[in-house]
Image (cartoon, rainbow, N blue to C red):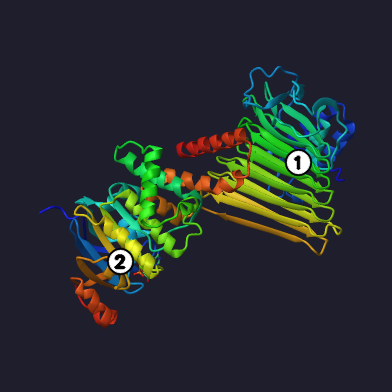
């Protein structure tokens, strides 16, 4: 540890907050490292020391959330977590919801903050096959605040569920620290969506961790399009043979937005498979980051891991930064990564326009076509509607900008 | 005298940001109801002419004029030209993954209708239009379910171009080497599709490399294209003459 690090104003404030939250150990650990800079490999393109120059001074306090924007879907079972406090219960057979204190910690400063500042963990246990989609609306209401919340999902062996999480809140410059942990029991099946309804001034940090036991099937989707700064880390450990996961996500950024999706997969045992499909669209001076790391441990023979990341750059100053990393210690594996990045294809534009389709509409068609692959597997109608509507309104905003 | 559908006057075109001139003074008048063929060897500038007519970016007109129904064509954007009745059947139709063929057809037809101030097509009407037109060109419904031109064979792409042309009912059809990549049977089907569209209000500019196509689509006039301009014009016998003499026999002619 480097004891001499000079803390920025924001870092001092975060340290003070940890102390006042009664967590001396975390405060000392944070003070030793500060916020991650580009010198830390996992934050190579997302230097938080410079991206987080100002942070809210206080934690979000209990609030009825009455004034916050919400997401509502028909026919789903819904709970809310407002400023870290659980509200409501799932009235679905096979699902129990409880809260407990948090004991988590972490080396990474963002994980450390997220864990240390969490109040109650919302624990969800799922058994059997659910006949309803679960929805958790994670809301930050009131004045600009730091909010840490944590959801921990356990799927018993053979359980089957779909969880849609939405991030919502009041229109203030919040710092969100969201943690989601999911353990999939043997043969469990889980679909997980995270939809972005943050305010544009929010700085959003989500840490998603998955553990897959034998024959578990997971599919995940992350959308990042609203906050000034957002970073979602997805980490998954494949600990049982026959487990399979599909990870997907989208950065859709404009203005001076910065969006980072960082994925770290650990194939630890034989016969596990994964796919990754991530798409990035940037306009203006938007900056999208995708980092994908795949570790294949020595015993993890027959691992098949396919990673794909594509970028569509709509402006001269937009950036898509991609970093794949493979660390393979087994010899009989299939691992591949592909990254493509480009502008809208001129010949395709001309073809559509030569058929009478105006430029704006042709552009929109090609952008939707670019996204088709990542939306195609989304099988929850409500989610499809939200995503399509957001793409439509986003395209509209770009025209007006 | 009625206004010709297309008049090209002393058209000079170069590639933007390059000095290379590709079209070097093209003159052509295409009256309503006529079919003209343009024949020329590879690289003579035929596709460039078709792109400039359709409004592709990247070319600069340095001299000359194009009138479409008497209006300045070069003032219009590509999509406006289409709505005004110009259609280019591409030599190499573009594959667009992620755009369903039917979605594309509906968007294109409705965009053209909208710009002419017409109502959008009702879905059942649209479906029937496409189904009937596709049947005439022996295009299977299954093909229409695929993304636009993706995984189509060369012949299927050309048939899909003619399908679009039949649906859009343009007043000027520019066909750029529609015969290339077609076997004899497909050539017959496509030619019948084109011939079916011949009418007194519609003109066609049929660009080809071989005279073979002109046995099926019989032109009113034939123009020989060489090094960026028309060097000789005549009736359809000129195509036969070209076939026997070869293009070399026409080099260095003046129009
Ligand atoms: N965008 C371009 N940039 C540079 N050269 C071009 C471009 N388009 C066409 N050309 C050149 O112009 C000439 C004519 O090409 P083209 O119009 O395709 O001929 P054709 O269709 O008769 O075979 C060729 O030498 C070709 O290489
Ligand atoms: Mg050509």
Q: Which chain carries label 2?
A: B
Task: Locate the C terminus of chain B by quadrant.
Answer: bottom left
Residue that badge 2 annotates: B207
Residue under the point 39% across and 67% down? B182
Q: Nearer the viewer, residue B54 or A243?
A: A243
Q: Quarter of the image holding residue A124? A: top right
How packed is label 1: few (under 14 Cα within 10 Å), some, or many (20 or more)? many
Percent across and percent down for residue A284 are 53, 43
Of helix, strand and loop, which one carries label 1? strand
- The relative height of residue A44 versus residue A158 in the rendered view (above or below) is below
Are labels 2 and 1 assigned to the same chain? Answer: no
Query: Can residue B77 be seen in this snapshot?
Result: no
Residue under the point 46% across and 46% down? A363
Percent across and percent down for residue A348 are 45, 54
Q: Is residue A325 left or right of residue A281?
A: right
Tell which quarter ligand 2 is in: bottom left
What is the total number of numbered labels drawn onto the structure image?
2
Residue under the point 22% across and 69% down? B222
Residue that badge 1 annotates: A189
Q: Nearer the viewer, residue B211 or A61?
A: B211
Give the residue at the far left of this rendering: B1
Percent across and percent down for residue B217 are 27, 65
Q: In this view, does B99 lie to the left or right of A195?
A: left
The label number, if any, that marks residue A36 in the structure image:
none
Q: Distance between the residues labelled 2 and 1?
A: 58 Å
Percent across and percent down for residue B115 are 32, 41
Q: Is residue B223 left or right of residue A206?
A: left
């Amino acid at each position: 540890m480097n004891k001499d690090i000079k803390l920025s104003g924001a870092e001092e404030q975060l340290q003070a907050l940890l102390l006042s939250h009664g967590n001396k150990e975390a405060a000392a650990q944070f003070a030793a490292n500060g916020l991650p800079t580009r010198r830390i490999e996992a934050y190579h393109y997302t230097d938080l020391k410079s991206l987080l120059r100002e942070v809210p001074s206080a934690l979000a306090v209990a609030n009825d959330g009455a004034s916050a924007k919400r997401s509502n879907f028909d026919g789903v079972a819904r709970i809310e977590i407002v400023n870290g406090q659980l509200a409501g219960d799932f009235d679905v057979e096979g699902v129990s919801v409880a809260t407990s204190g948090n004991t988590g910690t972490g080396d990474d400063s963002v994980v450390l903050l997220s864990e240390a500042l969490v109040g109650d963990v919302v624990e969800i246990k799922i058994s059997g096959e659910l006949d309803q989609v679960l929805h958790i609306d994670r809301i930050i209401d009131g004045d600009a605040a730091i909010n840490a919340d944590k959801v921990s999902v356990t799927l018993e062996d053979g359980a089957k569920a779909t969880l849609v999480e939405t991030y919502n809140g009041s229109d203030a410059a919040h710092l969100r620290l969201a943690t989601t942990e999911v353990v999939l029991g043997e043969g469990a099946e889980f679909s997980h969506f995270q939809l972005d309804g943050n305010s544009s001034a929010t700085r959003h940090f989500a840490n998603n961790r998955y553990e897959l036991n034998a024959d578990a099937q997971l599919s995940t989707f992350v959308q990042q399009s609203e906050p000034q700064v957002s970073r979602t880390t997805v980490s998954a450990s494949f600990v049982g043979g026959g487990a399979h996961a599909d990870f997907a996500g989208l950065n859709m950024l404009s203005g001076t937005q910065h969006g980072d999706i960082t994925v770290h997969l650990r194939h630890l045992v034989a016969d596990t498979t994964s796919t990754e499909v991530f798409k990035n669209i940037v306009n203006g001076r938007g900056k999208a980051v995708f980092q994908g790391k795949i570790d294949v441990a020595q015993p993890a023979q027959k691992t098949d891991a396919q990673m794909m990341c594509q970028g569509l750059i709509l402006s001269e100053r937009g950036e898509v930064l991609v970093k794949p990393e493979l660390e393979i210690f087994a010899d009989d594996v299939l691992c591949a990564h592909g990254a493509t990045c480009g502008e809208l294809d001129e010949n395709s534009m001309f073809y559509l326009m030569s058929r009478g389709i105006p430029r704006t509409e042709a552009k929109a068609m090609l952008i939707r076509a670019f996204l088709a692959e990542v939306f195609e597997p989304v099988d929850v109608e409500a989610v499809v509607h939200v995503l399509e509507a957001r793409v439509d309104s986003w395209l509209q905003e770009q025209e007006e900008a | 005298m009625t206004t010709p559908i297309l008049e090209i006057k002393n058209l000079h075109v170069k590639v933007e940001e390059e000095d290379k001139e590709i079209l070097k003074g093209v003159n052509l008048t295409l009256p309503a109801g006529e079919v003209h063929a343009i024949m020329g060897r590879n690289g003579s500038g035929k596709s460039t002419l078709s792109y400039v007519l359709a409004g592709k970016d990247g070319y600069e007109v340095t001299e000359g004029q194009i009138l479409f129904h008497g209006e300045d064509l070069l003032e219009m954007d590509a999509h406006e030209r289409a709505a005004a009745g110009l259609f280019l059947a591409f030599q190499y139709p573009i594959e667009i993954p992620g755009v369903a063929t039917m979605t594309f057809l509906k968007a294109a037809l409705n965009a053209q209708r909208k710009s002419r101030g017409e109502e959008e097509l009702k879905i059942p009407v649209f479906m029937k239009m496409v189904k009937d037109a596709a049947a005439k060109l022996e295009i299977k419904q299954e093909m229409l379910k695929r993304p636009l031109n993706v995984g189509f064979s060369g012949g299927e792409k050309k048939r899909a171009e003619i399908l679009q042309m039949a649906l859009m009912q343009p007043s000027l059809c520019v066909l750029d080497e529609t015969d290339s990549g077609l076997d004899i049977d497909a050539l017959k089907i496509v030619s019948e599709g084109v011939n079916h569209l011949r009418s007194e209000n519609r003109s066609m500019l049929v660009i080809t490399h071989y005279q073979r196509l002109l046995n099926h689509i019989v032109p009113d006039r034939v123009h020989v294209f060489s090094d960026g301009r028309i060097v000789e014009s005549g009736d359809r016998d000129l195509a036969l003459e070209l076939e026997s003499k070869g293009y070399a026999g026409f080099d260095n002619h003046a129009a």
